[in-house]
Image (cartoon, helix red, strand yellow):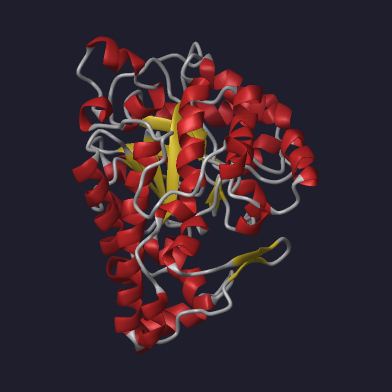
Amino acid sequence: MACNARVVQGGSRGMGSGLEARGGLPLPRGRKSALVHASTSEEAVVGSGGAEDAKTPRLVKAALGQPVDRAPAWMMRQAGRYQKAYRDLSAKYPGFRQRSETTDLIVDITLQPWRSFKPDGLILFSDILTPLNAMGIPFEIDESKGPIIDDPVTQLSDLDKIHAIEFDKVSFVGEALSILRDEVKSAADVPAVLGFVGAPWTLATYVVEGKSTNAYKIIKCLCDSDPGVMHGLLQRLAESIALYCTFQIEAGAQAIQVFDSWGGQLPPAMWDVFSAPYIKHIVDHVKQKHPGVPVTLYANGSGGLLERMKATGADVIGLDWTLDMGDARARLGDSVSVQGNVDPVTLFSTKAGIEAAIDDCIAKAGTTGHVLNLGHGVMVGTPEESVAHFFEYNRSKLY
């Protein structure tokens, strides 16, 4: 699930990283791009009043439980194949990894829904697998089959090839985030620029299985047969993904979403062991380095995990569409914000149906700590006019 988190979207570094388009050169390992924003703890903290507070995007305030005039809204898979502009660009640049690893294309695609719909958040067009290449885990994307890892991890010695993330190999991510901040900073209603990462467990499903799966047999069996391999892999992923979060923040991301897309495939007791501690490591790292930057945790099929997700320390719990917003609020309480959770299929319905779904969601979420979203990504074939109406109608729903 990339995001625009969708792992079936990917592209090829061989087609260009975007550095040539911007006239830059590859940076030494660990060096920041000249385009990176100066992001300090003082800049990140909101709610202190004054001019800085006034400039904080509505979405960031809502994520941190600050007062807002209405629910901010964005959509997972906000940029993608449902938009004609994206399909036209994809015809010109057919490789997903080319599109998601070329700075100018990342920026253009991320801005496509902003130009059309003016959402309150712009999520970077990228993929949860993008940092794997920078960690010694090469992958490819088959446009029909999805991600493919030819050398999956199956035993302890396979971990030797995995190293700490090398930021010069994901420089296009930092450059794109910095440019996006500059592109929208003069807007009348400035949107938040959102970064994202995959949770270690979700990334591990690809690293161990070698491809997408519906059953997760190999990785679940490995958890039982050789938990040391799994924990070694998950720890390596967690450490680099935590650093990748701060890299994105220091480049311009004003909030981070962690996608544990396949966490809901684990029984809760297994999630406690093989997912939660590694998500908590990431959240703790972000909170230590950038305490004012909100972290959202989303897991599809997470009805049995809500209280556990809250215990990770995430600021916002993303809800899928199978949960009633009122039930989720009752279970989570008011000390954490929520995101979601309109059924994506609603966007194929009538305007009245879309409005009713938004009304129900907003009423049950309350006026504090709610970011309106779908309960999953925008589906292929979704009418663009329905997406437009979703955002237009929500803008009219002042608290």
Q: Is residue 280 visible?
A: yes
Q: Please, which residue is most extreme toward the bottom here?
A: 225
Looking at the picture, does residue 231 appear above or below residue 55? below
On the image, the x and y values in percent for residue 310 come to 27, 49
Taking depth in this image into account, of 72 and 30 the one nearest to the observer is 30
User: The N terminus is located in which quarter?
Assistant: bottom right
**Quadrant position of residue 119:** top right
On the image, the x and y values in percent for residue 214 come to 58, 71
**Quadrant position of residue 164:** bottom left
Q: Is residue 326 visible?
A: no
Looking at the picture, does residue 366 appear above or below residue 249? above
Q: Residue at x 45, y 64 (%)?
A: 203
Q: Residue at x 43, y 51 (%)?
A: 197
Query: In the visual, does 110 lie left or right of 366?
Result: right
Looking at the picture, does residue 255 appear above or below residue 228? above
Taking depth in this image into account, of 252 and 354 the one nearest to the observer is 252
Q: Residue at x 65, y 47 (%)?
A: 99
On the image, the x and y values in percent for residue 51 come to 28, 10
